[in-house]
Amino acid sequence: MSATAPYAGTSLIRRPLAAAALLAALVSLVFGLLLAGAGPASAHAALTGSDPADGAVVDTAPKEVTLSFSEAVAMGDDSIRVLDPSGKRADTQAEPKDLSEGSTVRYGVALHSGLPDGTYTVAWKAISADSHPVSGAFTFSIGAPSETTVALPSEEAGGGPVGVVYDIARYAAYGGFVLLVGGSAFVLVCWRGGATALPMQRLVVRGWLTLTAATLVMLLLRHPYTDSGKFADAFDLAGLQSVLDTKPGAALVSRLLLLGAAALFIAVLFGTYARREDEREKKDLTFGLAVGGGVVATGIAATWAMSEHASTGIQTSIAMPVDVLHLLAVAAWLGGLASLLVALYRTPDIGSAAVRRFSTVAFGSVVVLAATGIYQSWRQVGSWSALTGTRYGQLLILKVALIALLLAVAWFSRRWTGRLTDAAVASEDVAEEEPGSESESVSADPERAAQLARQRAALTATKKKRIRDADPQRSGLRRSVLAEAAVAVVLLAVTTMLTSTEPGRTEEEAAGGTPSASAPATGGPVNLKMPFDTGGQNGKGTVRIDIEPGRTGSNDLHVWIDGSDGKPMDVPELKLALTLESKDIGPLPVVPDRLAEGHWSASAVQIPMAGDWKIDVTVRTSDIDQVTIDKNAKIG
């Protein structure tokens, strides 16, 4: 019988023109909605401000240090540490106080009284509402800046060897979920005969084992991942208890409980269901397994939605169900694709009818993925600059490109599927039914008969495999499905990376590149030109200053001095200071390093907030001749 229906599970679309049209519409909708923008949304928490501000110089010692965040965070003991110039604790070492009001998230720690002048370092760490650890450090000075022995942490929260193992477990968990759910759905919906196929059983069981092991590893490493960074603390009972009291910990425990129910589902699917021969009873059992398995799969998917990006930011009541649908669609499509690959290579019995049924499942999955993916992209990116200028946006572009490649490869699978036939099956069945004279002669010997039956079964399976391997249509389909699976593995890895990457909206907010409701500043390079005259011999010239990128956060500053003849001019001393008089911030001193004749530079110059900054430049041309000039510039 000829299988003329298209293979939309790997082709997904019934005609090449329809595939191209759907892909073009998908890409246009995604990027069009990204341009439309939306209100502020956050996923990873970002430090939005502090008091004292980063780099600020205050006249008297503050009573406390406060930090403001873009979203709710969880903090524990030592989440905020203030260190004096010698590295000793300047805070009271009490648990940070929650000073939040309304939508403003703020925490603070009290400082010791009578702190001496100098530069103080504030190191902080917290857990975002989406379960990811975040950390940072900044400095402020009392009286005047000073030398400090404190080294700012170079490793971000969640880094190091523990972070690597935790991320591997995160990837493995997604892979196990895809194989478990997608493989089970493939057997129930597309190929019920697969319940008796040992390769299909192994695929689903291995998916369950992978997801279970990865979840246990993540639960044990959760405390080291977010706090100590040491493998030895994985079995710290106090740390484990603190994890269980958090939202991510509860999600991991819930996943383990649901995996217990999934184990029962697998036992019934490949046990009772596989042995059931009565079609009516099997149909009823199929319905029961589909409903029960769907509930368990939805629950497992919800453990990600309740603890990661979907659980925080705008429209969480919509985002979480959408995230569950997205995960289930990914599992049905990619897990089904893996199951089809195993069936084509490892089993001789799958026919064109199963391929056609998977076609329908995969097409529906792609439609759901398109709709939910558009919404998630709009929610997490929201602008062209975030799409092209952040790591999250760049990964999203890569994901869309991989989907396009997957659809292109799938079109070739559709061509092979259109030629696929089940003629080989019929010929094999006829050959299998031919009686053998030897079996009749030994029918009286049950042991010999059983041995011959096993031999005939093995010989028949070998013949089936040889005939199917010789089928050029089936071989072509195998190769194209294998190519799709390879692209799908990369696509799944990129999708997993997106879940642990700071969304574009938040990254731009933290960097000061996205306008907010209270600070409509876009920033841009600052270029200043100021003439000076120290009054001494050869005391006239011009100072040129460039500040890039010219926004809040870290900036690079370059200073050129030209003499009255227009040539580069060296001076014995050059100092700068920045002051934001409207907010009583500064002066913040900047001491640039000499790079070449008439050229000085300073990197990592911190601009704590946007505003009209006064830039003071002190130029000394001799032991007694110097002058200070100033000019205002909009920064941030």
Image (cartoon, rainbow, N blue to C red):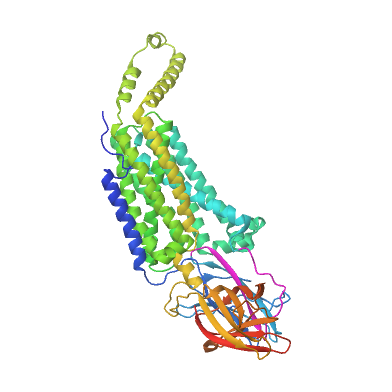
Q: Is residue 404 magenta?
A: no
Position above or below: 301 against 289: below
Q: Is residue 145 magenta?
A: yes
Looking at the image, residue 558 sits to the left or right of residue 385; the answer is right
Q: Position of residue 24 (x, y in %)?
A: 31, 53
Q: Position of residue 599 (x, y in %)?
A: 63, 74
Looking at the image, residue 405 sits to the left or right of residue 563; the answer is left
Q: Is residue 338 visible?
A: no
User: Magenta stretch: dominant SS?
Assistant: loop
Looking at the image, residue 589 sits to the left or right of residue 294; the answer is right
Picture quarter with the N terminus? top left
User: Which of the 4 quarters of the picture holds residue 360?
Assistant: top left
Q: Is residue 174 visible?
A: yes
Q: Residue furthest bottom?
A: 535
Residue in the image at 68% along x and 90% along y:
536
User: Which of the 4 quarters of the picture holds residue 189?
Assistant: top left
Position above or below: 5 against 513: above
Q: Nearer the viewer, residue 209 or 376?
A: 376
Q: Nearer the viewer, residue 543 or 634?
A: 543
User: Which of the 4 quarters of the picture holds residue 245?
Assistant: bottom right
Count the marks: how many? 0
Q: Position of residue 132 (x, y in %)?
A: 53, 63
- Which residue range is magenta in the image? 130-155
Q: Nearer the viewer, residue 564 or 380?
A: 564
